[in-house]
Amino acid sequence: MRLLLFLFFLYLLSWQVAVADTVKIEFTADDSYSIEVANIGVGDTIEWLPKNEGHNVEFLAGPNMEALPEKSDLNVRHAITFDLPGVYLYQCTPHGNMGMLGLIVVGNNFDNLGNIEEVELSRVAKSVLQRLIRVARSSKQPILSRNVLVHLRLVG
């Protein structure tokens, strides 16, 4: 029985890795990201696609400032898997002062939102950030773990 339970547990772990989502965000001609506020689960990946030239991804704040991802080069595909819940703020380095910002909310966790609001930005970018925060708060929805869904299907 223990072996069967162990094998079932391993199956659940492998299933979680296999179903992690990837959200694709494009650099637009309007100096913005195609998705400005992304709500994702822990373990999901964001992939930025260089559909327009002159853009990149640079993280300004997140739940662990020491572990923020590296700034991407201009005009390249960039992908990051998010394993730490919280809010992440990023910009396009050349266009950040003009408001080319994005927010990622991982695991529906807003605990570090105060730190995001304190990031020094230009007046235009600060206004854009306030709009993105309103959007993030209004779309705040509970994210049900896929492990819980599998458990519910098997038990229920």
Image (cartoon, helix red, strand yellow):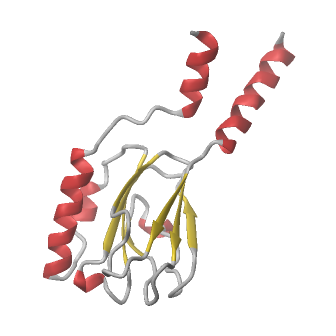
Quarter of the image for the N terminus: give it. Answer: top right
Q: Position of residue 121 (x, y in %)?
A: 22, 79
Task: Answer with left or right where residue 58 lies relative to residue 112.
Answer: right
**107 over 114 or under it: above or below:** above
Q: Residue at x 56, y 73 (%)?
A: 78
Locate residue 13, reporting x and y percent. 70, 35
Quarter of the C terminus within the rendering: top right
Instruction: Report which quarter residue 113 is drawn in.
Output: bottom left
Q: Is residue 58 shown above or below 15?
A: below
Q: How many marks?
A: 0
| Residue closest to the eye, 147 or 114 | 147
Q: Considering depth in this image, is 53 or 115 the residue closer to the camera?
A: 53
Please tell me in which quadrant of the rendered image residue 38 appears: bottom left
Left/right placement of residue 117 relative to residue 30 reads left
Question: Who's the residue at 31% across and 86% down the image?
Answer: 95
Residue at point 46%, 88% (across, down): 53
Q: Nearer the viewer, residue 44 or 48?
A: 48
Q: Left or right: where does residue 16 sit relative to residue 1? A: left
Q: Is residue 62 above or below residue 124?
A: above
Residue at screen point 52% across, 86% down:
75
Q: Residue 71 appears at what percent x and percent y?
A: 49, 80
